[in-house]
Image: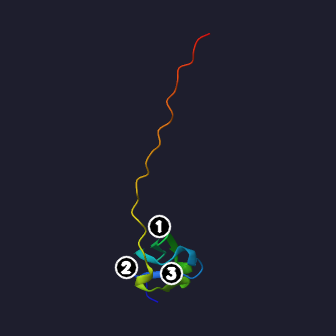
């Protein structure tokens, strides 16, 4: 299998990651953004673990949604005795 940037692949040893889109290919590693939202670097020695996947199976991870920050409770002054 020829792997190039933009290809959709899956890792046969980690199906829970989902399908991934190849971002970068070098002679020593491939960088892939998987459907679970994590970019992973796969070493050349593990290229055989990558299998072509259907383009429809890749769902890009959701954009980062800002989390509403909670404010700490107001502090009250201690009374002097």
Q: Earlier in the sequence, mark 1 or mark 3?
A: 3
> Disc 1 versus disc 3: distance between alpha carbons?
14 Å
Badges 3 and 2: C-beta atoms under 8 Å apart?
Answer: no
Residue at horizontal 49 percent and vertical 66 percent from the top: 38
> Disc 1 versus disc 2: distance between alpha carbons?
16 Å
As drawn, 61 above or below 48: above
Residue at horizontal 41 percent and vertical 83 percent from the top: 56
Badges 1 and 3: C-beta atoms under 8 Å apart?
Answer: no
**Pointer 3: residues within 10 angstroms few (<14), some, or many (20+)?**
many
Q: Which residue is mark 2?
A: 6
Q: Earlier in the sequence, mark 1 or mark 2?
A: 2
Secondary structure beneath dot 3 equals strand
Which quadrant of the view contains residue 79? top right
Name the residue nearer the viewer: 75 or 61.
Answer: 75
Which quadrant of the view contains residue 16? bottom right
Which quadrant of the view contains residue 55? bottom left
Q: Is residue 14 visible?
A: yes
Name the residue nearer the viewer: 73 or 10.
Answer: 73
Task: Give the percent coordinates (x, y) of residue 81.
Answer: 62, 10
Q: Which residue is mark 1?
A: 37
State the residue lying farthest toward the bottom.
Answer: 1
Task: Give the percent coordinates (x, y) of residue 20.
Answer: 46, 76
Q: Which residue is mark 3?
A: 10
Left or right of residue 55, residue 16 in this image: right
Mark 1 vs mark 2, foreground winner is 1
């Amino acid at each position: 299998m020829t792997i190039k940037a933009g290809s959709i692949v899956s890792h046969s040893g980690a199906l829970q990651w989902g399908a991934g889109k190849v971002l970068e290919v070098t002679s020593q590693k491939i960088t892939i953004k998987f459907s679970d939202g994590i970019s992973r670097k796969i070493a050349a020695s593990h290229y055989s673990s990558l299998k072509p996947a259907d383009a429809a199976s890749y769902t890009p991870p959701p954009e980062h949604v800002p989390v509403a920050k909670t404010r700490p409770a107001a502090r009250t002054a201690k009374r002097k005795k």
